[in-house]
Image (tube, rainbow, N blue to C red):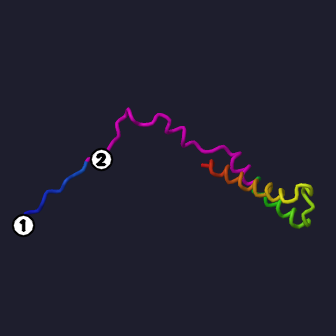
C-alpha cells in the first residue's frame, strides 16, 4: 500500500498592519507603591478586626459598633483590588 503524502503547514505570521501598536506599554511592571499599599491595607484591616474583638467591641471606634467589621474587611477587600492590578 503506498504511503500518503505528509502535509506541511506553514508557520503563521500575522500581518504587520494588524499587530497592536501599544503591546510594549501594557507589559510594563507595576509601580512599587501597589504591593506596598496592598500589604499595608491587609495589615491594617487585620489589626482593626483584632483590636475590635480583643477590646470587647470598645475600640477602635465604639460608636460605630458593627461597622468596625466593615472597615476591617473593607481594607482587606481594597487590598485585593490593588493586588489585581499588580504585574
Image position, residue 21 (x, y; %) = 47, 34
Residue placed at 11% from the left, 62% from the top? 3
Residue 15 as seen in the image, left or right of residue 21? left
Residue farthest to the top, as pictured:
17
Q: Residue 70 — which label?
A: none
Image position, residue 63 (x, y; %) = 92, 55
Front residue of this view, candidates 70 and 24? 70
Question: Upstream in the sequence, badge 1 or badge 2?
Answer: 1
Q: How many numbered callouts? A: 2
Above or below — where is 58 with respect to 25? Answer: below
Element at label 2? loop
Front residue of this view, candidates 60 and 16? 60
Image position, residue 26 (x, y; %) = 54, 41
Q: Which residue is mark 1?
A: 1
Element at label 1? loop
The stretch drawn in magenta includes residue 73: no
Residue placed at 50% from the left, 35% from the top? 22
Crowdedness of circle 2 by 10 Å Cα count: few (<14), some, many (20+)? few
Residue 4 as seen in the image, left or right of residue 15? left
Residue placed at 12% from the left, 60% from the top? 4
* Magenta residues (range): 10-39
Q: Which residue is mark 2?
A: 11
Above or below — where is 51 with respect to 24? Answer: below
Kindly indicate the quadrant of the structure image that contains residue 66. bottom right
Residue farthest to the left, as pictured:
1
Above or below — where is 11 with respect to 1? Answer: above
Front residue of this view, candidates 38 and 50? 50
Real-space Cα separation, disc 1 to disc 2, in angstroms? 31 Å
Q: Main secondary structure of the magenta part?
A: loop
Q: Are marks 1 and 2 in contact (CB under 8 Å)?
A: no
The stretch drawn in magenta includes residue 14: yes
Crowdedness of circle 1 by 10 Å Cα count: few (<14), some, many (20+)? few
Amino acid at each position: 500500500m503506498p504511503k500518503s503524502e505528509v502535509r506541511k503547514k506553514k508557520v503563521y505570521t500575522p500581518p504587520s498592519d494588524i499587530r497592536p501598536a501599544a503591546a510594549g506599554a501594557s507589559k510594563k511592571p507595576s509601580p512599587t507603591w501597589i504591593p506596598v499599599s496592598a500589604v499595608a491595607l491587609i495589615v491594617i484591616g487585620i489589626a482593626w478586626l483584632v483590636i475590635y474583638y480583643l477590646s470587647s467591641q470598645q475600640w477602635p471606634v465604639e460608636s460605630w459598633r458593627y461597622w468596625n467589621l466593615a472597615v476591617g474587611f473593607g481594607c482587606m477587600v481594597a487590598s485585593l483590588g490593588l493586588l489585581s492590578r499588580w504585574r
